Amino acid sequence: MALSFYNTLARKQQEFVPIEQGKVGLYTCGPTVYNYAHIGNFRAYIFEDLLRRTLEFLSFDVNHIMNITDVDDKTIRDSRAAGLSLRAFTQKYQDAFFEDIDTLRIRRADAYPAATEHVNEMIELIRKLFDAGVAYQAEDGSVYFSIANYDRYGQLVRIDRDQLRPGNRVKHDEYAKESVADFALWKAYDQDDGDVAWNSPWGKGRPGWHIECSAMSMKYLGPHFDIHCGGVDNMFPHHEDEIAQSEAANGCKFVNYWLHCAHLVVDGEKMSKSLGNFHTLRDILEKGFSGREIRWVLLGTHYRQPLNFSFRALEDARASLQRLDAFQQRLDEAETMPDAGAGNAAAHAEETALAFRNALEDDLNVSAALAALFDLVRDMNRLLDQNAVAGKGVRPIRKTLDHIDSVLAVLTPDESENVPTDVQTMAEERQVARKNRDFARADALRDQLAEQGWIVEDTPNGPRVKRK
Ligand SMILES: [Zn+2]
């Protein structure tokens, strides 16, 4: 099967053909660092991580760029409210962002250009847009993109050009599709900007949000590159405006494949502070869930389907991951036994690897990919029950699991999920008590473990401790 993605620009699934063989230029819109990122944001970053890891799994050399928006309407508004300089304010959330993506095992991009460090590139780009006849300075001193002078405007979200009312302007970074209008490239300074301003040929001011991504993607990936991603809420106006700016300035196609991930809802409702269902990653970690469990939930729904987040789903994630951990422990144990069943296990492993790859090549079909993994677990558990796979026979299964985990990154528990030493000691003491037929002592230890949130399972290979 050939690798294919649903391309928003084409409105259909298309085979992926890179511009340069074996290489992929990938740009993903990064965080606006004015607050802790919430799980809706991380849903998009996890989808992008799955994409990136899948491309690398398929042996592509990926150059992944993610910007940091550290100047825009929101960062200026909230830094002033906090009484901090823009830099001091955004630094805190930028640091938190990197901590969070590490917690979620998101592979780091090759570069994270910050908007404030690329204002010169933005000014250069705006100059090009003047040369191309699509930029103008309005009476308010700000510079706008003229959508009337650019006849390809609206190609991503299919705007009906007959409905356009030329000359309307919008200065805010975010606006609805109904208010499509000339948008700001350079915003003339006003008092609400405090001390945030740069000099430009059009006077003191600051860049608009959309020009940031055009300037930075161009600098790091060139005028024409392979894949651009974001959440569906980025499609308009942000991505539409990026296309207009980049294509008008460079006179060539901007991006070949646009991939967008659907929304995240919480218990079936839109996440909002007023409904009390707004969660940052930190909120959920504080409730005792691990980064791996959260990653599992955010990863498990196909990226173009809305993801329904719930604490029930996190509980289910815990159970699924425990099943995978237990399976790996069984493999560890089987590996110490005399060789058996190498041929059978190898055939299963190969079949799984192929099914996993085929699933991901089909527009990142993660459900089918996970099904392939769980089929392997079920079939191998059956063979392990019969002692029909052991010793060196385990190796091909391990190899396939490692291969799969280079994409999923869920098979190693977090530090916080490991069984603490004192808990392990109690479980061993209980085992000794049982051997000595001191059942009162064994039961007391079991209850004590349960109080601390641990259960002991007695298996043919001895007791196994797991989280309740
Ligand atoms: Zn962007």
Image (tube, grey):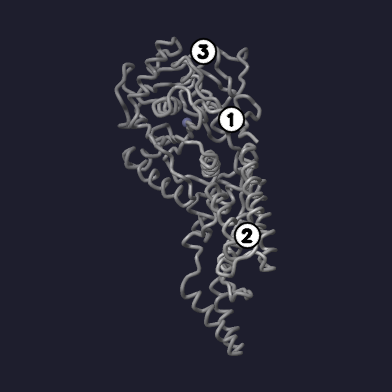
Residue named by callout 1: 16
Q: Quadrant of the C terminus?
A: bottom right
Which mark, residue 392? Answer: none
Sequence-wise, the earlier of marks 3 and 1 is 1
Earlier-in-chain disc, 1 versus 2: 1
- The residue at which mark 2 appears reads as 342
Choose mark 3 or mark 1, whichever is in front.
1
The reply to whether dot 1 and dot 2 touch (C-beta < 8 Å) is: no
Q: Are marks 3 and 2 in contact (CB under 8 Å)?
A: no
**Residue 444 position by quadrant:** bottom right
From the image, which quarter does the N terminus lie in? top right
- Look at label 2 and name its amino acid: Ala
Foreground of the two, 249 or 119: 249
* Disc nearer the start of the sequence (3/2): 3
Spatial CA distance of label 3 from label 1 is 28 Å
What residue appears at the point 42 percent right and 15 percent down from the top-left corner? 129
Q: Amino acid at mark 1?
A: Phe
Q: Quadrant of residue 390?
A: bottom right
Q: In this rendering, would 162 be left or right of 146?
A: right
Q: Nearer the viewer, mark 3 or mark 2?
A: 2
Find disc 3 in the rendering and name its residue: 150
Q: CA distance from mark 1 to mark 2?
A: 36 Å
Identify the residue at horizontal 55%, vertical 17% (top origin).
153
Assess disc 2: are there few (<14), some (14-19) or many (≥20) residues with their C-alpha within 10 Å of its C-alpha. some
Tag 1: Cα neighbours inside 10 Å, few (<14), some, or many (≥20)? some
